[in-house]
Amino acid sequence: MIDLESARQTQVPVNLGAFVHFVSKSGIRTKVVLAIFGLFFALFSTNSAADLTGVWTIEYAGKCWTEVSESQCSGPAPGGSRLTLNEAQGEVTGHFYGAFSSWLRPKPDDAPDANINSDGTIPIQAASFDGTTLKLSLSFKLCSVPGCTPENYSWELTWDKDNPNILTGIQRQWGGTLASGQLNHQVRLNREGGPIVHVRDPSAGGSWVPWILIPGIGWVLYKLARKGRKKREEEPKEYELDIRTQDDRTSLTTDGEDLLWVYAQVRCNKPEVNTEALTSGLAFTAEGTDSKWLLLGAPQSTNGFKAVPVRAWPPSEDAQLAEGEAKVTVSAVIETKRISGPVTIRLEDEPQLKVSILG
């Protein structure tokens, strides 16, 4: 997704009347030089830059070590570990989804400082970015008993601007299951889907300095810009229903404990459309031959998405699966029209434990 943001403008005081008089009295050579300068200024006055915003998967990429031993580690971090970052002018926020997150949910008896979101993600508590080095840290608790040791993570990573989809550095982990030491990994973070580029929104206006340099060229470019803007305004609205599942899973065990989150969001190519309100109005329903096996919890809002927890349980003691699958359908009414999209979920019987007595 590409975000549009207005660049800061520096207003330069100019005696417009005197300048226009100078241009009108200048020779053709001076006018050509001024035209080139004005065009150059117009082309290079628009700012664009890639930042760290996006989803980053964590991969072990070399050595891992504790205070007493070391070895070579490679491959994806456990649990589909990833970092979701939002960065603007050096300010970084986001959250961590790690090995514990597939089953981690806050419970009523959890400690107040568990620092776990309702969807199992863990917010980043401290972050800094100087344009090259990114430092992140977070801490959370897996239990609420007295003396429970927090699980702590920190990253110190280097961003290569020539390859904006890669961060390399060190991940440190201590506390929790590693209460007696610290585990360090050489890691590589890979951005999913490529960099997000922030560019100046043409409709937000720009510096007026280039246009007063050459009135003729300025007028032509102004008319072209107006024509382009009018064309954009005449483009039809296009809506998109983005549906995702937790860890890209599409299966549930019918034990009433296995949990799968379904996320959905409405998007539109027109920024003036209130997609947040449309997203909050999304409805989730269970459909299909085995739909009675699905248990849909209360919807929640998270990171711009509306999400619903889904479990599976037999509707009766003697119930049998017919097709072994059901659908969670996400729907919305937009401009009097109903749009919807299904997620097909495979239902798997709860594993049975067979005990044989050997005589």
Image (cartoon, helix red, strand yellow):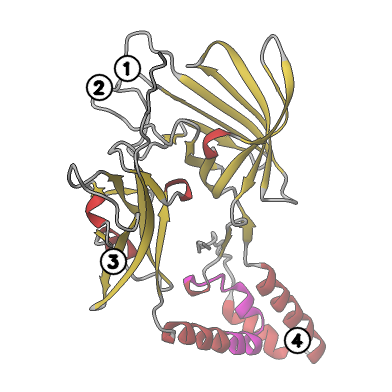
Q: Which amino acid does label 2 sit on?
A: Asp
Tell me the amino acid under the disc marked 1. Answer: Ser
Q: Name the residue under label 4.
A: 31
Residue 48 appears in the figure: yes
Q: Quadrant of the C terminus?
A: top left
Q: Is the magenta stretch mostly helix, strand or loop?
A: helix
**Residue at coordinates 40% horizontally, 60% vertically from top-left?**
243
Return the disc, 4 or 2, that comes first in the chain's sequence.
4
Residue 219 magenta: yes
Q: Earlier in the sequence, mark 3 or mark 4?
A: 4
Using the rendered image of the protein, determine whether residue 304 is visible from the camera's viewpoint: no
| Residue underneath mark 3 | 331
> Which amino acid type is marked by label 4?
Lys
Give me the disc on residue 125.
none
Q: Are marks 2 and 1 in contact (CB under 8 Å)?
A: yes
Residue at figure coordinates x 47%, y 50% from the top left = 248
Label 4 to label 2, Cα distance in Å?
A: 76 Å
The part of the image, by quadrant, that contains residue 173 is: top right
Please rate how many residues cluster around mark 2, counting C-alpha atoms within 10 Å: few if below 14, some from 14 to 19, many from 20. Answer: few
Q: Position of residue 252 (x, y in %)?
A: 37, 45
Amino acid carrying label 3: it is: Ser
Give left or right: position of 98 versus 164.
left
Nearer to us of marks 4 and 2 is: 2
Query: Relative to residue 66, is residue 172 depicted above or below?
Result: below
Instruction: Judge by depth and name the residue closer to the eye, 115 or 39.
Output: 115
Give me the residue at 31% from left, 66% from top.
274
Q: Residues within 10 Å of mark 3 (few under 14, many from 20)?
A: many
- In front: 81, or 249? 249
Please report the bounds of the magenta region as a residue range. Answer: 204-221
Which residue position holds label 2? Answer: 109
Residue 186 left/right relative to 338: right
